[in-house]
């Protein structure tokens, strides 16, 4: 089915003057046909003359100029109408008046629309009074006045619809801009938060390196093996820290952000305390571990922990379920986490799930997706076919290089 928008796309946006010219010709055509036909004249009617043709053109032509000069066009049309009526010519001149009333009401101000309504009604009344009773009976006057009223009401209704549509479009565009701005702000805030947390990891690494270097410097002469172990630890820690900083270089900004404390950020090893917290909130959690934990970079460890934390928080806030399962899968090249709850969304609460079954871009989802994107991983979140919600994240472990 063709919609108005589709028709406009096909036809483009024609020139308003072209539209008005077509309307003027269509409304002038019936008058021209009547003026061209030679027929028996009724008592009081006069035959067609050149003056009749000129007046007929002046009645229809103002439709071309009504957008720019509404009142002047109305004055020319009605003056020509009265002159035409005084000449008692045969063709009915009402149709162009209806069209002009419609056009002024649709395209001009409310004041001009009311002026067109009352001036047209009055001029038509006077024009019909100039005719004989045989030519212009009472029914003709009633039909003509109703025609003017219908034209005015139709234009008023269309103008209100157009204004309402324009308002809705403007509101939709404004809301879309606000949503985009909110999403950008959420991404920025989340990136800055990730930067602060990873800064804690880097600060912790620097602290370890400082301690190990002090130990190595102290025992290098008396215990060279211990000094060698300290140097190896410094090398591993510094390489890991450099990998984290290179990954974030050019991605995260830390302008005006506090440096944070030297306390290392939490990781997957701290899930016991997290589970205790969420169980105190009424959510039972089962942890499943697949594979053996190997060396996990601090940034990956922190992000996996935060993803689990955010997903469990969303279950508490948005789901009617009282239980959730967390699966952690360790592989040589990645760490994967999966959080599943089987309950439906809690009634009356924004569950971050759209009615068509897709995850909406809430701040929690944005944050988890952003954490995974920093490491070039894979992320998916969405409702399950049988109810509940599933969050999957795979964080690759890049090889530490110098």
Image (cartoon, rainbow, N blue to C red):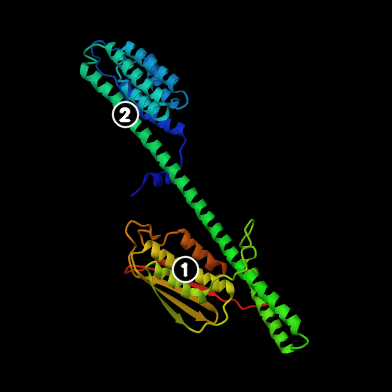
Between 149 and 337, the residue placed more toward the observer is 337
The CA distance from mark 2 to mark 1 is 61 Å
Task: Measuring from the top left, give residue 95's x and y in whole percent.
Answer: 32, 25
Q: Is residue 390 visible?
A: no
- Indicate left or right for 46 with 303 as reference: left
Marks 2 and 1 in Cβ contact (< 8 Å): no
Which percent across, then down, holds residue 47? Answer: 31, 14
Residue position marked by numbered label 1 in the rendering = 309
In the displayed structure, 171 sits above or below 185; it is above
- Helix, strand or loop at disc 1? helix
Residue 303 location (% of width, % of height): 53, 70
Q: Write down the residue under mark 2.
A: 153
User: Nearer the observer, disc 2 or disc 1?
Assistant: 1
**In which quarter of the view is residue 67 placed?**
top left
Q: Which mark is residue 50?
A: none
Instruction: Out of 184 and 94, give the one closest to the viewer.
Output: 184
Q: Nearer the viewer, residue 129 or 347?
A: 347
**Residue 171 higher or lower than 314, as above or below:** above
Packing grade of label 2 (10 A; few <14, some 14-19, many >=20) is some
Instruction: Give the camera-side residue of 270 and 300.
Output: 270
Q: Which quarter of the picture shows residue 165?
A: top left
Q: Residue at x 51, y 72 (%)?
A: 304
**Along the horizontal axis of the image, is 249 left or right of 271?**
right
Q: Secondary structure at mark 2?
A: helix
């Amino acid at each position: 089915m063709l919609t108005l928008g589709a028709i406009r796309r096909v036809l483009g946006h024609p020139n308003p003057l072209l539209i008005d010219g077509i309307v003027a010709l269509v409304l002038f055509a019936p008058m021209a046909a009547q003026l061209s036909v030679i027929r028996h004249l009724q008592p009081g009617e006069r035959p067609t003359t050149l003056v009749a043709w000129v007046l007929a053109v002046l009645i229809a032509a103002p439709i071309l100029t009504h957008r720019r000069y509404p009142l002047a066009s109305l004055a020319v049309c009605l003056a020509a109408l009265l002159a035409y009526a005084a000449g008692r010519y045969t063709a009915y001149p009402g149709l162009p008046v209806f069209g002009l009333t419609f056009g002024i009401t649709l395209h001009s101000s409310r004041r001009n629309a009311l002026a067109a309504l009352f001036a047209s009604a009055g001029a038509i009344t006077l024009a019909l009074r100039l005719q004989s009773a045989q030519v212009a009976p009472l029914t003709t006057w009633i039909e003509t006045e109703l025609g003017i009223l219908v034209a005015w009401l139709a234009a008023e209704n269309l103008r209100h619809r157009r204004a309402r549509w324009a308002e809705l479009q403007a509101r939709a565009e404004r809301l879309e801009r606000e949503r985009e701005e909110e999403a950008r702000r959420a991404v920025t805030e989340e990136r800055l938060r990730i930067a602060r947390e990873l800064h804690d990891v880097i600060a912790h690494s620097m602290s370890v390196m400082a301690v190990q270097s002090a130990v190595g410097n102290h025992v290098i002469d008396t215990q060279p093996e211990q000094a060698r172990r300290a140097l190896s630890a410094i090398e591993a820690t510094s390489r890991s820290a450099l990998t984290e900083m290179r990954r974030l270089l050019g991605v995260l900004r830390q302008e005006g952000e506090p440096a944070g404390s030297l306390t290392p950020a939490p990781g997957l090893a701290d899930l016991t305390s997290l589970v205790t917290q969420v169980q105190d909130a009424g959510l039972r959690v089962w942890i499943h571990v697949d594979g053996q934990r190997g060396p996990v970079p601090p940034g990956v460890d922190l992000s996996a922990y935060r993803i689990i934390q955010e997903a469990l928080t969303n279950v508490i806030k948005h789901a009617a379920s009282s239980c959730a399962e967390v699966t952690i899968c360790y592989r040589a090249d990645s760490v994967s986490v999966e959080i599943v709850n089987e309950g439906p969304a809690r009634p009356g609460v924004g569950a971050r799930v759209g009615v068509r079954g897709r995850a909406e871009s809430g701040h929690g989802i944005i944050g988890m997706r952003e954490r995974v994107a920093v490491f070039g991983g894979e992320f998916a979140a969405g409702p399950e076919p049988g109810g509940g919600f599933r969050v999957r994240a795979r964080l690759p472990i890049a090889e530490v290089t110098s």
